[in-house]
Image (spheres, rainbow, N blue to C red):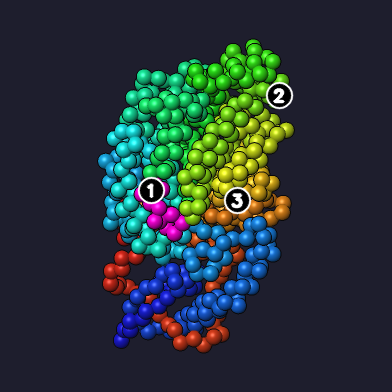
Amino acid sequence: MALTLRSSTSFMSRLDAGIKGNRSAEEFPVASSVAPVSRAACGRLRAVAKAAARAAQPQRRCQDEEVAVALHGAAAHRREVGGGGRVGVAVYVMLGLDTVSREGRLQRPRALNASLMALRSAGVEGVMVDVWWGLVEKEGPRRYDWEAYAELVQMVQRHGLKLQMVMSFHQCGGNVGDCCSIPLPPWVLQEMDENPDIVYTDRSGRRNPEYISLGCDMMPVLRGRTPIQVYSDFMRSFKERFNDYLGEVIVEIQVGMGPCGELRYPSYPESNGTWRFPGIGEFQCYDKYMKASLRAAAVAAGHEEWGEDGPHDAGHYKQFPEETGFFRREGTWSTSYGEFFLDWYSEKLLEHGDRVLAAAEGVFRRSGAKLSGKVAGIHWHYCTRSHAAELTAGYYNTRQRDGYVPIARGLARRGAVLNFTCMEMRDEQQPGQAGCSPEMLVRQVRQAVAAAGAELAGENALERYDENAYAQVVVTAAGSAEEGVGLSAFTYLRMNKRLFEGENWRHFVAFVKKMSEGGRKSELPRSDRSHSDLYVGFIKGGGRRSSKPEEATAAL
């Protein structure tokens, strides 16, 4: 005789093998058909039911919050996520880069709907999506098409999820993980053809169309408007269209400030094999606007000759520091000229970030949505004196100088969260010859954010599905006096078919659960002392359920 049981928890996996990623009652209500089973199975499940009931008690929840504050400090105390009173780190998931097609339509809406349902069941707080400048304003200046994004916002809202929306003023294509091509708006590309100096340029004259050069931030080079004015108009139109959702569904606006949406120079482009890991990259200061700024800075410093050109001995994209005169151990970077140049180069980047964030702050002030800015996790050659790869990207961080405190202070000044990558990486997993230390880099950034009084969020740099990567993020999420602040949120890269595959999905659900608990390890009891009356059998077959992750996988 078979029974139909409606349960608040999924008991589909054998307890003996360990159930990973159990969901709370609010997260994953399911209906299952079951058959009678042994007393042993009944006993084990009684323990699960009692443990779930205890976890739901308000008194226990308050105790957990006190423990979290004691362990991580008040500054790193996590907000309650999901409306369920749980203390922890909210987890978001990045949607595909091509969620909106180049024709301006929401791609595979049925698959997306199923995927969102599965993510919600796993306890995910929300999703992140790129709002591409090249798609929204492609028909001409100030001609915006928000309809595909409006459809997405409404779909996310129906599932009770939140949205982080990225103002993506860069092109998609040519970098790590780019799976599609979305160029800048056609009318902007026309301006580039007529005036190639509005894009970043390296020493050999190679132009990079990923992002408008910060050298012309205040120049009316885009049909009579400056790039900052164009970005501001774009964000203002976005706010007008989605004002009713800001602060409720759209909880964060990540402001793109460079290639890949990151505050940096495009110093390591992968397109056409220009750069290869772990190359040092190249300085991007050779368009006419940047060169004019360098000359003016040199004159002001009393060394007009320093402004004639950028460093002549900085090498090429794929080289190592010791192969160059500029970046080697006692190289030009440590001379008076090197310090002047690096001060100017990094300060220009900081000024650009402040201009774009100031525009965003003016638009979204009192909207209820947080602002954030993304900083790249450039961990290769971190163990060298010069930190060459960071320097070419615009981060003046060396053995003698902290380059992340100024960045964190700039973001804090505008009330923006610093979103940092490579949270999943461990030093031991990196190639020895590359001088990598992602763990030391993350520690430095956490300490810089603490010193600046800012807020820190994180991402993984590469697609990872293994327990080791998740464990590293969980460890990083918790703050301490020695390590710096913890994470206020984490955005997982990225939603695709592989995420929903059996073992990958189980690892991910367990990770979300641990993050929601502030990193505390949670295990099922090994015996039943509660004498509960709940039992369930193992199912061979059954009815179709729309919330299964397998359905999302099949449709993606």
228 or 318, which is in the foreground? 228
State the CA–CA distance, disc 2 to disc 3: 32 Å
For mark 3, what is the residue?
A: 455
Any mark on residue 334, and which?
A: 2
Q: Secondary structure at mark 2?
A: helix
Identify the mark nearer the N-term, 2 or 1: 1
Q: How many numbered marks, from 0 up?
A: 3
Span highlighted in magenta in the image: 238-251
Q: From the viewer's perspective, tell me whether residue 448 is left or right of residue 490.
A: right
- Look at mark 1 in the image and give the residue it sits on: 240
Q: What amino acid does circle 3 point to?
A: Glu
- Name the foreground residue: 187 vs 328: 187
Q: Which mark is in front, 2 or 3?
A: 3
Q: Nearer the viewer, mark 3 or mark 1?
A: 1
* 181 horizontally vs 392: left or right: left
Looking at the rendered image, the quarter that the N terminus falls into is bottom left
